[in-house]
Image (tube, rainbow, N blue to C red):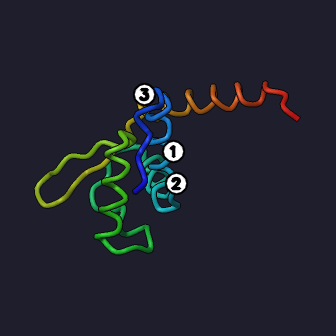
Amino acid sequence: MAINKSAEFSEELIQLAEFAKALAHPARIAILQTLAEKQMCICGEIVEVLPLAQATVSQHLKELKNAGLITGEIEGKKSCYCINWDALERFTGKMNTMFKNLSQQQCC
């Protein structure tokens, strides 16, 4: 049986991996692009712009919300979603720092 060794890494690396995993599907990137283009919270429109079933879109929204990249509220029968800009800025800052540190290494 495989043993999960994630706990052996720093909290920062675990969070970075969770953010990256949340973005690791084209539907999730499309959701973020849609939210950014609207520049406001949107309710129900996300399903209309993606070539996916409602249940599939809901699952992708759940993954983005669990990673903290979006926020969502239920208004009546609809759920409204917005980008969590603070979390997105933290994530991009950490990714930029990581790539900068990697690019400074001279290994080959």
Q: Residues within 10 Å of mark 1 (few under 14, many from 20)?
A: some
| Residue 4 vs residue 105, the one in the foreground | 4
Question: Residue, x 35% and y 39% (percent of image)?
Answer: 68
Which of the numbered marks, if any, corresponds to residue 11?
Answer: 3
Q: Residue furthest front?
A: 1
Q: Total of numbered circles in the picture?
A: 3
Under circle 3, the secondary element is helix
| Residue 5 vs residue 48, the one in the foreground | 5
Q: Earlier in the sequence, mark 2 or mark 3?
A: 3
In front: label 2 or label 3: 3
- Quadrant occupied by the C terminus: top right
Q: Position of residue 15 (x, y in %)?
A: 44, 34
Q: Earlier in the sequence, mark 3 or mark 1?
A: 3
| Residue 32 vs residue 103, the one in the foreground | 103
Which of the numbered marks, if any, corresponds to residue 20?
Answer: 1
Q: Position of residue 42 (x, y in %)?
A: 32, 52
Gap in angstroms between the C-alphas marked 3 and 1: 14 Å
Which kind of residue does numbered mark 2 sit on? Ala
Q: Is residue 51 left or right of residue 44?
A: right
State yes or no: discs 1 and 2 in contact (Cβ < 8 Å). yes
Q: Residues within 10 Å of mark 2 (few under 14, many from 20)?
A: few
Question: Residue, x 46% and y 46% (percent of image)?
Answer: 36
Which kind of residue does numbered mark 1 sit on? Ala
Q: Position of residue 21 (x, y in %)?
A: 48, 49
Quickly name the residue at label 2.
24
